[in-house]
Amino acid sequence: MYYIIGDIGNTSTRICLLNKSKILKSIIFDTKNIFLKGYIKKILNKFFHKKLKKEILFSSVVPLAFKKIKKNFKTSNFTIYEIKKFNLKKIIKINIKNIKQLGSDRIVNSIEGKKFRNCLIIDFGTATTFDIVKNGVYEGGVIAPGVKSSIKNLSQSTALLPMFDLKNIQKSYGKNTIDALNAGFIWGYDGLINNIINKITKNWKMNYKIILTGGYANLFKKIIKKKSIIDQDITIKGASRVYREFL
């Protein structure tokens, strides 16, 4: 069974070709490109296979981008779905008041993380999100500022502070602007991330898995004090479970 899964994020979008649960091909591009004429069809053409299913599933946190894709395929043989169209509570119990307020990416991350029964998923995306699965139930989470977006906002809001690439080594406070910025972000997020982890897990009396994903996962794995693993495919894997359950 060959099929296409997409993950539309605020900054970037990833589209994958899968066979059963295996990712065969993957392309990542800027989400804003979805609004360019003919762009998304050109991308999806690279995934077409003679045994490809006609249903394409997206996890999307950008409604206008998903709407644009759906419009592009309105007259095609393909049907475009977003994961929230389906009764996801058949796959995972979601213990929050309004599922509409929960990002699709966070839902599918938790669907995949559920296999560990107890886990904390930290996604270093446009926002830094912490999602809790406890006894196989999605219990809620925490949303903090994203690293890259914070760097960008600081640069754009000041006359003299530049954009810079975050380095994972900071032994001392800065002797120049770049090192001072790096110290602020590395040490600041060190405190933020580890403090949130401690507050979430301090009363857990069971084994739990900390799963990292997103652009800064590799960098912050070295800073997080508790044992963690990296899974850059967790969102696609979770969406794949939704696809195989409903489509």
Image: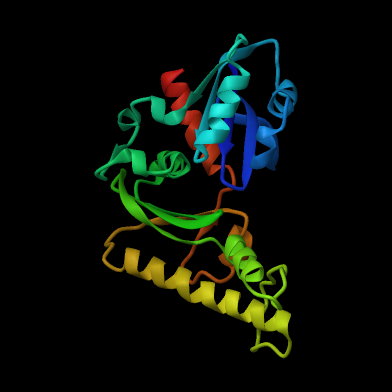
From this view, report whether residue 8 is shown above or below residue 197: above
From this view, report whether residue 151 is shown above or below residue 241: below
Please provide percent x and percent y for residue 230.
56, 54
Comparing 244 with 74, the one in front is 74
Q: What's the residue at 66%, 34% (across, down)?
A: 34
Q: What's the residue at 59%, 75% (across, down)?
A: 186
From this view, report whether residue 6 is shown above or below residue 208: above
- Count every numbered label the image shows and give the total: 0
From this view, report whether residue 127 is shown above or below residue 12: below
- Quadrant housing residue 110: top left
Please provide percent x and percent y for residue 167.
69, 72
Comparing 247 with 180, the one in front is 180
- Quadrant housing residue 99: top left
Q: Quadrant of the N terminus?
A: top right
Q: Residue 55 vs residue 208: left or right?
A: right
Q: How is the image coloured?
A: rainbow
Please provide percent x and percent y for residue 20.
56, 23
Q: What's the residue at 59%, 74% (across, down)?
A: 185
Please provide percent x and percent y for residue 135.
28, 47
Q: Residue 215 vs residue 102: left or right?
A: right
Instruction: Inspect this view and state whether residue 19 appears.
Output: no
Q: Residue 190 vs residue 51: left or right?
A: left
Q: What's the residue at 53%, 43% (across, down)?
A: 234
- Quadrant housing residue 14: top right
Instruction: Inspect this view and state whether residue 32 appears.
Output: yes
Q: Residue 180 vs residue 240: left or right?
A: right
